[in-house]
Image (cartoon, grey):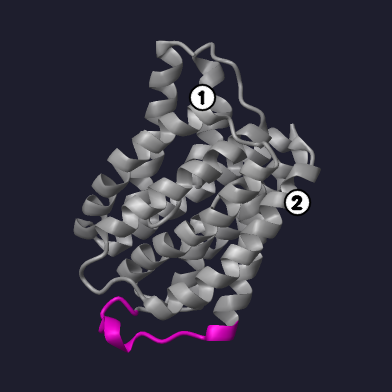
Amino acid sequence: MDLSFIIVIFAIGFIGSYLSGMLGVGGSIIKYPMLLYIPPLFGLVAFSAHEVSGISAVQVLFASIAGVWAYRKGGYLNRQLIIYMGGAILIGSLIGSYGSSFLSEQAVNVVYGILAVIAAVMMFVPKKQVDDMPLIEVTFNKPLAVILALIVGVGSGIVGAAGGFLLVPIMLTVLHIPTRMTIATSLAVTFISSVGGSVGKLVTGQVDYWPALIMIVASLIAAPLGAKAGKKMNTRILQVILAIMIAGTAIKIWFDILL
C-alpha cells in the first residue's frame, strides 16, 4: 500500500462522503463506480465487485452517521420515519448482504445497475410541492414505507450500499416528504441500513480493511462539510444534482455490463 494508493482511495472517499452529506445518500451511488474504475486509471490494482461492495458497506456506516450529526438540530429528522423505515431496511440489508456472498461478480453489478436505473427514473418523476409544508405537519403511509424500505434493504445489502440513493427518491416521490427532511432522515435510515450491511459483509469476509479504514477517515471529515453545504443550497438544485449523478452512474454501469 503506497502513497499513491492512499491518496486515490482517500480522494474517492472524500468526494463521495461530501456528496453523501449534501444530498442525503450514503455515498455508494458515486463511490461504487469510482472504486471500480478509478484505481486502475492510476496503475493501481483493480478491486473486485465483492471488495468494492464490502468497502462501501463499512464506509457508509461512518459517512451516514457523520451526516446525521450535522443535521441533528433544526427539526429535520422525522423520528417516526426513521423507526418504521429503519427497522425494515435493517432486516432487508442483513438478508441482502449475507446472500451477496453466493452471487457472482456480474450478478452484483447487475443488481447495482437495476437499483441505479430505478432511482434515476424516480428522480425525474414530477413531485408534489411539499417543501413549504411545516415540518411538524408531515405525515406518510406507514405500511408502504415499511414495504419499500424492506425491498431497498435487500437490494442495497447485496451491493454494499445502504440504499440512500433509493431512499431519497422514494421519500420525495412516493411518500411526499419535504426535501431537507428527506435528506436528513434518509441519512439516519441509511446509517441503520449500513449496520446490517456491514455485519453481513464482515461475517462473509468481503471487506478489505485498509482501503475501508482510509475511506472512513475521509468520511468523518467530508460528510459534515457536505451537510453544511446542503443546508444552504436551493432544494431544487440538490434534487437536480442527485438525479444527474444517479443517471450517469446507471448509464456507465450498464454500458460495462452489456459490452
Depth check, front residue: 171 or 188: 188
Instruction: State the SS at label 2.
Output: helix
Image position, residue 186 (x, y; %): 43, 64
Residue 117 at least partly seen: yes
Depth check, front residue: 180 or 2: 2
What residue is shown at x 39% (from left), y 67% (from top)?
A: 185
Q: Which residues are magenta?
A: 130-143
Q: Give the residue at mark 2.
A: 99
Q: Quadrant of the C terminus?
A: top right
What residue is shown at x 65% (from left), y 57% (from top)?
A: 94
What residue is shown at x 61% (from left), y 40% (from top)?
A: 53
Height in image: 44 above or below 75? above
| Left/right of residue 235 with respect to residue 124 in the rendered view | left
Q: Amino acid at mark 1?
A: Ile
Q: Categorize mark 1 by other alpha carbons within 10 Å: few (<14), some (14-19), many (20+).
A: some
| Magenta-drawn stretch contains 27 | no
Height in image: 114 above or below 107? below
Q: Give the residue at mark 1.
A: 38
Disc 2/disc 1 C-alpha distance (Å):
27 Å
Image position, residue 166 (x, y; %): 53, 60
Image position, residue 142 (x, y; %): 53, 84
What residue is shown at x 22% (from left), y 59% (from top)?
A: 231
Instruction: State the SS at label 1.
Output: helix
| Left/right of residue 43 with respect to residue 159 in the rendered view | left
Toward which corner of the image does residue 136 lie, by quadrant? bottom left
Q: Nearer the viewer, mark 2 or mark 1?
A: 2
Residue 124 at least partly seen: no
